[in-house]
Amino acid sequence: MHEILKLLKQHGECLDSELASATKMPLAQVHLHLSELATRKLVMLCQSTKFIKGKEVKAIICRISGYIPPAKPGAKAKVQITLS
């Protein structure tokens, strides 16, 4: 579980399949660890459905609870709105 937390802290947000390939764990074991981390409220999980070339792909998106990754360098400035 420490590997999963470490990867989430490095990348901010990951899919369950990305975590499985990075940690070289089976997807079922990653799901088990993620559900345990979610019950401890260490991570937030979100079900996602994407359609890739017409095929439905279901995944779990996860990130560390309460953690906002720092802004990337060179981010665009915020747009100022002027009211007329």
Image: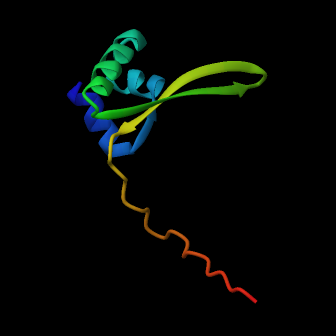
Q: Quadrant of residue 81?
A: bottom right
Q: Is residue 73 above or below residue 53?
A: below
Q: Is residue 71 above or below residue 20?
A: below
Query: Where is the C terminus found, in terms of image quarters?
Result: bottom right
Side (left or right) of 46 relative to 31: right
Side (left or right) of 1 relative to 35: left
Residue 16 in the image, given as x and y percentages of width and height: 45, 24
Residue 65 in the image, given as x and y percentages of width and height: 33, 41
Determine the residue positioned at 24% across, 27% down: 40
Most extreme residue toward the front is 84
Determine the residue positioned at 43% across, 40% down: 13
Residue 82 in the image, given as x and y percentages of width and height: 68, 86
Most extreme residue toward the bottom is 84
For the rendered model, the colour scheme is rainbow
Most extreme residue toward the left is 2
Determine the residue positioned at 37% across, 54% down: 69
Comparing 58 with 41, the one in front is 41
Query: Where is the N terminus found, in terms of image quarters?
Result: top left
Residue 21 in the image, given as x and y percentages of width and height: 41, 22
Most extreme residue toward the right is 54
Q: Quadrant of residue 26?
A: top left
How many numbered circles are shown?
0
Side (left or right) of 7 relative to 46: left
Q: Is residue 72 above or below residue 27?
A: below
Determine the residue positioned at 37% across, 53% down: 68
